[in-house]
Amino acid sequence: MIIPPTWSLPEAIRTRLGTSTYGRQRAIVEEGHLLLVLHKPPGPDDAKREGVLFWRSPGGEWQCNRSGPGVGGVKRHVLAYAEVEAKLTADFEQATTLDQLFDLLAALTPLVRASRNQHAALQAAREAVKAEAALIELRDLAYEVERNLEVLLEDTRNAVGYRSAREAEEQARVSRAALHASHRLNTLAAWFLPITAIASLFSMNFAHGLNEHSPKLFWLVFAVGVGLGFGMKGWVVAKPPEDHPHNKA
């Protein structure tokens, strides 16, 4: 049983709770009794929520199934969310990588949802038990915590989008630089390939007789190689013809 045996709750409330599970966060009011079903701040990997029960008797006395008596237990419970929010805010200010921001998103998403449901439960309790003035402060505190967490979640999402765009831009810049370097390499290869091919051909050890002729023949061969190099360079750097609409079938 999740309800302490010493609690004198009406049967109408007992039947709305399970024997081993807390269910969603909510306020249950029956016969002047108020039972708050709240959740502790969830972690990013918590598959199951850890619940807490706060009971206010018709006489105004508060009890908790996990701590001592008094309405201060409810306030400490809400402030636990504020402490987590302060820690995550510090983590956000120190985050320098996308991985750190994604970890923040994973931690904030369930926390924002839980704080929103907590605020709704305290708002319902305030509307049902107007005689309890402490519920006003608790509701307002829960709203402040919820709002701060929502703002932090939005800031984190914006930071993820901004840094993702910056990294994509940097990757595009690196890709353009690599493409430009490859283009230069291809251009140099186009210039020197004919010359090196001709030089390799004439350096082979067979009798060709060109070494016995005038040096003009050497410069002629060199000029032909350079001309072929310029021709291949023009072919490498030339852009492919664009397709015109009237050429398409």
Image (tube, grey):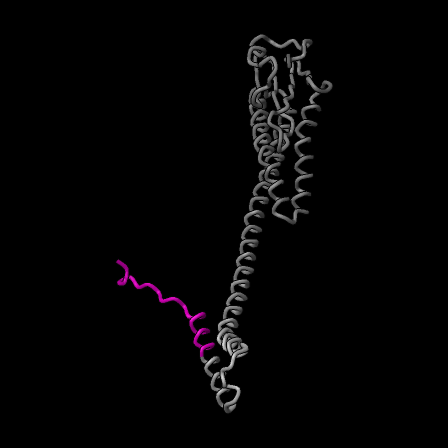
Give, as a single range, the part of the protein colored magenta. Answer: 228-249
Quadrant location of the N terminus in the rendered image: top right
Q: Is residue 142 above or below residue 90?
A: above
Which residue, as the protein is rendered here, is positioned at the far bottom? 214
> As rendered, which of 209 and 180 lies closer to the eye?
209
The image position of residue 10, as x and y in percent, is 60, 9
Q: Is residue 240 within the magenta segment?
A: yes
Q: Quadrant of residue 111?
A: top right
Residue appearing at x 45%, y 82% in the figure: 224
Residue appearing at x 54%, y 54% in the figure: 168
Q: Quadrant of residue 148?
A: top right
Q: Is residue 217 left or right of residue 77?
A: left
Residue appearing at x 27%, y 63% in the figure: 247
Residue appearing at x 64%, y 32% in the figure: 43
The image position of residue 143, as x and y in percent, is 60, 33
> As rendered, which of 129 and 114 lies closer to the eye?
114
> As rendered, which of 3 and 184 lies closer to the eye?
184
The number of callouts visible is 0
Quadrant location of the C terminus in the rendered image: bottom left
Q: Is residue 71 within the magenta segment?
A: no
> As rendered, which of 62 and 243 lies closer to the eye?
243
Which residue, as the protein is rendered here, is positioned at the far right? 68
The image position of residue 29, as x and y in percent, is 57, 16
Q: Is residue 111 above or below residue 181?
A: above
Which residue, as the protein is rendered here, is positioned at the far front? 207
The image position of residue 24, as x and y in percent, is 56, 22
Q: Is residue 69 left or right of residue 238?
A: right
